[in-house]
Amino acid sequence: MDIRLDKNAYGKNAIHLSKIIRHPDRHEIRHISVNIALQGDFETVHTIGDNTKVLPTDTMKNTVYALAKDHFTTSIEEFGLHLADHFLTNNSQVSDVTISLTEYCWQRMTFDGVPHPNSFVNGGSEKHEALVIQDRRKTDLSAGINDLLILKTTDSGFEHYIKDKYTTLKETSDRIFSTQCDITWKYDSVPPDPGQRYKAIRENLLHTFANHKSLSVQHTLYAMGDAVLKTFPDIKEITLKMPNKHHILFNLEQFNIKNHNEIFIATDEPYGYITGTLTRS
Amino acid sequence: MDIRLDKNAYGKNAIHLSKIIRHPDRHEIRHISVNIALQGDFETVHTIGDNTKVLPTDTMKNTVYALAKDHFTTSIEEFGLHLADHFLTNNSQVSDVTISLTEYCWQRMTFDGVPHPNSFVNGGSEKHEALVIQDRRKTDLSAGINDLLILKTTDSGFEHYIKDKYTTLKETSDRIFSTQCDITWKYDSVPPDPGQRYKAIRENLLHTFANHKSLSVQHTLYAMGDAVLKTFPDIKEITLKMPNKHHILFNLEQFNIKNHNEIFIATDEPYGYITGTLTRS
Amino acid sequence: MDIRLDKNAYGKNAIHLSKIIRHPDRHEIRHISVNIALQGDFETVHTIGDNTKVLPTDTMKNTVYALAKDHFTTSIEEFGLHLADHFLTNNSQVSDVTISLTEYCWQRMTFDGVPHPNSFVNGGSEKHEALVIQDRRKTDLSAGINDLLILKTTDSGFEHYIKDKYTTLKETSDRIFSTQCDITWKYDSVPPDPGQRYKAIRENLLHTFANHKSLSVQHTLYAMGDAVLKTFPDIKEITLKMPNKHHILFNLEQFNIKNHNEIFIATDEPYGYITGTLTRS
Amino acid sequence: MDIRLDKNAYGKNAIHLSKIIRHPDRHEIRHISVNIALQGDFETVHTIGDNTKVLPTDTMKNTVYALAKDHFTTSIEEFGLHLADHFLTNNSQVSDVTISLTEYCWQRMTFDGVPHPNSFVNGGSEKHEALVIQDRRKTDLSAGINDLLILKTTDSGFEHYIKDKYTTLKETSDRIFSTQCDITWKYDSVPPDPGQRYKAIRENLLHTFANHKSLSVQHTLYAMGDAVLKTFPDIKEITLKMPNKHHILFNLEQFNIKNHNEIFIATDEPYGYITGTLTRS
């Protein structure tokens, strides 16, 4: 059988860009990282080293900085849409553009209740993500949260599961539930204010997590996805990746001490990894 | 429209296991990490918190350690196949099992040319990967190398590419080419000795990388995949992910010093990211 | 000359412990990591392998979990003091105990202004640190903040520095100043409420950083340390480590675009590293 | 009491530089990272923002690249000595220069026993370190190995230690001993060929580790340091930091399987941390 090139892509990753947006009374700081991937008519690039169709990844990087001046003024979703359009419009050899953007979280400092005009502190591990996939016919926009680390100290149990000869886990009706999750949703169409929408979905996700009577990670994962799809009709699909951050009850009884769900070993590995997609039908 | 559960999976990740294999004259040390993911009849787990079909991820972990005693004796590919079969056979609610395994690299210490019977030193960043995907009808086996960091100091150029108004990169016929690559291939069927096969493919990949006259990363990526497919007829597909580790010529001329391709800035970000799959048709 | 054992220590590191503190109306979650190091009469342990004076590091770990039940009820400083005292009192072969503790940051979730009783979200990269060094005569207590990532968009310049033949940096009266700093201070004596004190010092540090007209990193470092020593008379010394997180003005002029301090390259390496200790005399 | 500036330093860290050294028949690739720290007459820099004595860290970076052309031709020790001398000679306001250098490990590819002239593969986690501390009177040179990950499958036990009420560890006369160690030694004077010397000391360390009948980590740490000091009379002091990489026997007996020291849990945290310095008297 003949050998042939199948799916392929190339681009620049980890283009870290920061921007100061200057308002009369205060500054905003935005720090993002952009990944670009192009697909298209690149067979001879691979087979014979013909570079005449290759836009260098270095040029992609320059383009991101150049376009940020006028086009990164609101959400990363809107900047991503502009970048995708730019690369597709200006490169006839390209069939598909994928732009993924990550925004890091800065919180304005506040002193005695007064927000400071130009000083910020890191706002946590979580990142706002946007993903634009555009071809000659359509544009798909997704957004999400990465590394959202959340924890609840109660309203979580895990019981009535299968027991076999390798089972040692004890059932519990009250445990710590913590996960550092990545959550992504697909929009039917671009929402009016994607940055504001992101905040509303984040709030919705946290609210479900906090108030759900959890019988398992899967159970809460579904509840979180279900609530988002019910609240936001223009979201067609949501995927939740919820790795467990285990807090394991320490065996104090071996030292004749009672452990009423107080003292835990916090451990990173191994970890349960639960993923699910909810969609509409 | 109704909301429904689409693709979902759960399991245990990062099960780190080491094993001493004791031969009369020497020991082997094996250090692996195992990820397990199950798919199947799990809708009610999500929707109503019915755990009666859930094999806990903690039990999966115990099972890996228990089965390693008798069944992790040769390659990670063979151990993965055994694990997949075990979980599928013993769990009628499961339709698909995915086992991915990573083996870390230890090199036997050698003194004055004599291999030491029981002492080892870390063998580099690269890891041997195996992936088993099994359902009720078939089993797919893949293997690969992750984090293989390679570099050549010449026989690599990048010229004749598109120039536009954002181009600042200079053409070069001689540059450093370095990449920390992830490479995965799919087997038609399980090869007789997957561990030995892994070594042969790794050697083949290095040989092509070292001796190719590279006109671009894509050009070398294709050559590497092509050589593997030509040499090993039972491999049906190979995917190469080749992020650039850039070594950028430092501008010494600004200090009236010539830089004849000698002094470079080694930088991690941003980085070119080139991926491609070669298959047969 | 004879060979002899000089300074040595051993212990357990990265003992990750979480605790739920249960109040009638709400839960607190605490997540800490503890490092223990013992020094003392350990020469024969090293020279002849006499373990009869060795308290195993595994036992240290168990001890931390066991004592956390009754003695980790307020600040990590107070828990550290208890641990140091425990190991010194119970191990006559030990001359010096060092306990270092890290507390990770959780923020209570709030919905419509109402704090949730038992749900939390990760509170940022920064960590609260405490260090207890105790010998048979005295106890030294330090505390600090690690990985405090802060940024200001103005009121920072860097001018009038030395120029030599390798200078390419341009002077600027207005730049981004960002640093991921580690700050440690030594107490004269244990303050009444070390947890509350930590918050007050953190606030003081942020306030100085935000409002200082910075002529250099050193200039602001000194101002931050100076303000803490002036405000808190029982602090005898403060050390600030302030690695620069550079945001470098991108050269948009090469594309005929003005860059009025708007668009920056955010970069991790290389980075300026500025450290200083302020004390009293 | 008055507040005053105590110990302080500033400089550039993580200056990543690669160099191709071109021989007629082959290339060498060197990849290093350099940290520079200056101390001196910098009080007014801190107190009033007087930058006239400040050599910018950006200039330090440029200087490293510029001097590498002619002065980084052999070992990192010799390049470090040159850099220290350069900064001290050219900056009268500086009293002390600290240069620390890290060299990453590349191994030449070999095919059918023939070394390839210009292709390399990552040589492992370990790094060669050099440290130069120079003031107006003297120069101190240290070197070392960082992240040297080693393991032995036998000839290691841990018995006869203290038992108390928190002891759960079982004694063993045969266990896995693994450590990812950092080892640093101080030279009396600069050895004739520091690069060659580094290799000889590394070999010496591995040899002792491999062949020692270990009664504890401390016992082997001492033996390793002792052998280096005995073999190399111009080394005046050696410090070994040996964090345990624990491989914990998995309890297979709970499943009615014998575990004859075969199957282990490989775990990163918590970990024993053993450090010691050997010197001459």
Image (cartoon, coloured by chain):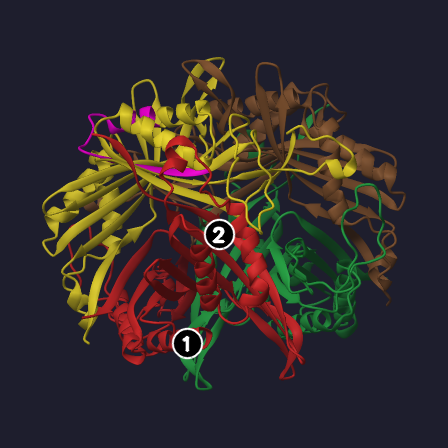
Chain colours: A green, B brown, C red, D yellow
What residue occupies the far right of the structure in this picture? B92
Disc 2 to disc 1: CB gap under 8 Å:
no
Closer-to-camera residue (C200/C13): C13
Residue A230, by quadrant, is bottom right
- Confirm whether residue B249 shows in the render: yes
Residue C156 visible to an observer of this rendering = no
Q: Nearer the viewer, mark 2 or mark 1?
A: 1
Tell me: residue D74, above or below residue C230.
above
Chain for mark 2?
A
Answer above or below: position of D278 versus C12: above
Quadrant (top left/top right/bottom left/bottom right) for the C terminus of chain B = top right
Which quadrant of the structure image shows residue B242?
top right
- Which residue lies at the image location 36% right of the left edge and 62% below the top edge? C256
Q: Which residue is mark 2?
A: A60
Left or right of residue C223, residue A112 in this image: right
**Element at label 2:** helix
| Place of residue D17 in the rendered image (x, y in percent of width and height, measured from the top left) | 33, 41
Relative image position of residue C11 (x, y in whole percent): 45, 48
Q: Mark 2 and mark 1: span between their CA atoms?
A: 49 Å
> Which quadrant of the structure image shows residue A147?
bottom right
Badge 1 crowding class, 10 Å Cα cut-off, few under 14, some 14 to 19, many 20 or more, is some
Q: Nearer the viewer, residue B49 or A106?
A: B49
- Residue under disc 2 on the same chain as residue under disc 1: no
Secondary structure under tag 1 reads helix
C93 or C24: nearer the eye?
C93
Compared to residue A208, the image places residue D165 above or below, namely above
Q: Which residues are magenta?
A: D180-201
